[in-house]
Image (spheres, rainbow, N blue to C red):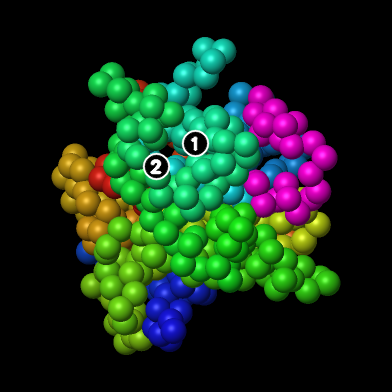
Amino acid sequence: MTSEAVALLRRPGTIRSRCHGLLRLAEADRLPFFRFDPGRMPAAADYVTDTIRRNYPDLRIPYHARWRHFAVGGVDRWNAVARRLEGEDAAALARRRIDLCVVSVLLDAGAGPDWFFHEPDGTRLGRSEGLGVASLHAFAAGLFSSAPDDPLRVDADGLEALTAAALGEAFQVGPGNPLTGLEGRAALLRNLGAALRSAPALFGTQPPRPGGLFGHLRAQATPWGLPAAVILDAVLTGLAPIWPARLMLDGENLGDVWRHPLAAPEGPAPGLVPFHKLSQWLSYSLAEVLEEAGIPVLALDELTGLPEYRNGGLFLDLGVLRLRDRALATTTLPVGHAAVVEWRALTVALLDRLADGVRARLELDADALPLARVLEGGSWAAGRRVAREMRPDGGPPLQVASDGTVF
């Protein structure tokens, strides 16, 4: 039975409230690592709005979901795979899409600047796009399936048999093409296989698959739809055992939850800041699958912005945030460093404020432009754009050591 404190740290409301708590301290200039310049926020909103108009002049912005990466360069790679599934009903197709989406998102954490994936036609892709396309090719080749006659699925047996060598071969890893956190990624997927087997109520038994979540979520939907927080709860519950051992509370591994000395000092679970970045991005990605399968997703803005280096880098590069100690920008920080936790928390809170400014400039409300669309249109693209303007390699302004499971 999950304790009340652990359940609290899995709620998107807790993510938001603790991050905004640290932003209030920033407004009082009481944080140890960053200064906040609210006078730079209008320029940031202008920059993101300009990026949206460049990328989506018709303002028809999709969700910030894994599916965007499968279509990088204007090539609909998922549709090419889906043609092999013609004749399947909507539920069966949704299960396969969830299979793909779960493994692809879990494989996404930062690739590092020196890794690239080369498609058969010679297209060269790096970073998130490269990881997404590589995972799609691996899925299409049956890497995650234990059934040779049914390659386009992900199942527990297939995942538990996955080696770093096999994953590295599929992702074209070699001496001249290093991928950050390869061993961690393979271990994460093996852990996923065990988690699928241990939670039949979520993932089914014939065989256990990530796509089993479709039946679980469909059963919780009302005639009006399914709240986004229910998707995140299922993801966090089902995937809780897969994360590397980090902070523990009441006997449970907390996952993407970290300590900051000034966070929620009065408790419960004082000093802890949850983010659940990959799980929330996965939830946004699954929302798209569910809606296309006929299940409306409600209250999408209960989920938060994503605290990763593109969104966070946007605020640093545009001067909204400034390091008190510039030396921190010249070293690689562990992901649990309090400065990284502070940066990520401020990113979550500032994305809420940024979204309000962008909506005002575009004359759209939150229903027309939910946070998931602001991220896509949007803050993530703007973070990449300004990084390329400021640094030749387009890398982030703050270096964080990734084990392949957070960033």
Any part of residue 315 in sight: no
**Dot 1: what SS?**
loop
The N terminus sits in image quarter: bottom left
User: At which x and y percent is residue 40?
Assistant: 45, 50
Q: Earlier in the sequence, mark 1 or mark 2?
A: 1
**Dot 2: what SS?**
loop
**Residue 85 included in the magenta stretch of the image:** yes
Left or right: 358 as drawn, with respect to 14: right
Q: Quadrant of residue 47?
A: top right
Above or below, 301 relative to 88: below
Q: Nearer the viewer, residue 339 or 33?
A: 339
* Neighbourhood count class around disc 1 (C-alpha, 10 Å): few under 14, some 14–19, many 20 upward: many
Q: Which stretch appears magenta?
A: 75-97
Q: Residue at x 49, y 36 (%)?
A: 143
Left or right: 90 as drawn, with respect to 142: right
**Residue 12 included in the magenta stretch of the image:** no
User: At which x and y percent is residue 136?
Assistant: 56, 34
Above or below, 27 relative to 347: below
Cβ–Cβ below 8 Å for labels 1 and 2? yes
Query: Where is mark 2, residue-wise?
Result: 162
Q: Residue at x 79, y 50 (%)?
A: 90
Q: CA distance from mark 1 to mark 2?
A: 8 Å
Q: Nearer the viewer, residue 19 or 3?
A: 3
Q: Nearer the viewer, residue 31 or 262?
A: 262
Which numbered disc covers residue 161?
none
Which numbered disc covers residue 143?
1
User: At which x and y percent is residue 104?
Assistant: 51, 43
Any part of residue 94 in sight: yes
Above or below, 223 relative to 375: below
Question: What's the residue type where badge 1 is placed?
Answer: Leu
Helix, strand or loop for the magenta stretch, by majority? helix
Left or right: 177 as drawn, with respect to 46: left
